[in-house]
Amino acid sequence: MSFNILIVDDSRTIRSVIRKTLLIAGVPTGELYEASNGLEGLQIMKDNWVDLCFADINMPVMNGIEMIEQMLADHMLEKLPVVIVSTEGSKTRIEELFRKGVRAYLRKPITPEIIRNVVKEVLGDYDEK
Amino acid sequence: MMKNDNRKTLCQVCFSVFEQLAFMFGDELEEDEIEIEADRFLRASMGFTGPQQGTVAIVVPLTITSLMACNILGLEEDQHIDEDTAVDALKELLNTITGRLITSLFGEDVVINLTIPVTEELNHTAWEALVESNEYLAITIEDNPVLITIQS
C-alpha cells in the first residue's frame, strides 16, 4: 500500500526537505503533490485523491488556517487529515489549529523519525499492513 | 540598539537553528574581529505583528548560501545550486530562527503573526554600514561572518 501525500508550503526548500524526509523515513508514498499556498493546495485536493496533507501556516495568497477552514466547509475534504509543519510555537495558535481538526503539529526542523511517527499515528502503522 | 537579553537569546537561537537545519556551526564574534573580502551579501528580513511588533534580519556573504542550501536540502557540497534555491534556503533559515526567537523572547501564550521573508542583495559598503551601526549582532558560521538583528 502507498499514500498520496500533498505538501503545501511556500518555501521550495521546505517542500524538498519534507519530500526527502518522507523517503528517508520509509513512508510508502504514491503520488507526492506540491503546492505553494493554500489555494493551490485546495485545487490539488479537489482534483486528486490525497491521503494526507502537510501544510505550513504562514503562506501568501491563502495561509494554512484559511485553507483548513475552506476544507472544513467542503464535505469532500473535511475528513482529509492535515499535519501542520511550521516554525510557530504559540500554544494558543496550536490549540486553535487542533480545534479546527488538525491531526498533528510539527515544529521545524523535522526529522525522519518525527515524520515516520506522525504518519503512523495519523494513517495507521503501514509496517503491519 | 538591541537589548542585551535579546542579543543572548538571538545568539543561542541562531546557533541552534544553523546546527539543526543546516548542519553548520557557529561562534560569537567581536565587532573588531569582523573581516571579510567578499563584495556581495544577501540580507533576508521578515516582520512580526501582534502584541509585539518588529523585524528580524540576517545578512550573510553570498558565498555561503550555496553550502547552506546544500546542507538543508541534503545535497553534495559540490552540487550546483541556482541562486533562487540559495535565496529560498536563506529565507527558510530566517523563518525558522524567527519562529523560535519569538517564542523564546515573548513566550508561548501570545499569538504573533509573521510576514513572508524578503531578500535584497547588499554590497560591501552596505555591509560595513550595518557592522558599524551597532544594531546587528555579529557571529561566525563556519568561519564566515554573519550579522543578525531583532528590532522590536
Image (spheres, coloured by chain):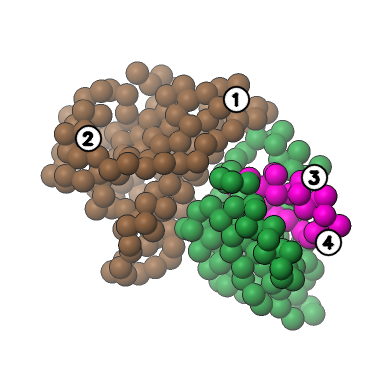
Image-based side of A78 in relation to B52, left or right: right
Q: Position of residue B84 (x, y in %)?
A: 37, 56
Subunit of mark 2? B
Q: Which residue is mark 2?
A: B127
The chain holding disc 3 is: A
Number of residues whose C-alpha sits closer than 10 Å to that of mark 4, classed few (under 14), some (14–19) or many (20 or more) = few
Q: Name the residue nearer the viewer: B83 or B8.
A: B83
User: Residue at 21% across / 46% down in the picture?
Assistant: B40
The residue under label 1 is B50
Few, some or many residues within 10 Å of mark 2 (<14, 14–19, 20+):
many
Label 4: chain letter: A
Check disc 2 and report its element: helix, strand or loop. Answer: helix
Cα–Cα gap, marks 4 and 3: 16 Å
Answer with the quarter of the image where residue A41 lies.
bottom right
Query: Horizontal and vertical percent for residue A36?
Result: 56, 56
Q: Colour of chain A?
A: green
Label 1 Cα crowd, 10 Å radius (few <14 / some 14-19 / many 20+): few
The mark found on residue A100 in the picture is 3
Q: Write the start and end of the magenta stretch as one range.
A: A63-86
Circle 4 — which element?
A: loop
Q: Which chain is brown?
A: B
Which comes sooner in the sequence, label 2 or label 1? 1
The amino acid on which the numbered mark 2 sits, given as a three-letter code, is Trp
* Mark 1, secondary structure of its residue: loop
Task: Measure how far apart labels 3 and 1 are at the Cα level.
Answer: 22 Å
Asked whether the viewer can see residue A112, the reply is no
Eyeballing the image, is A108 above or below B30?
A: below
Mark in front: 4 vs 3: 4
| Residue A99, placed above or below residue A36 | above
Residue A38 visible to the viewer: yes
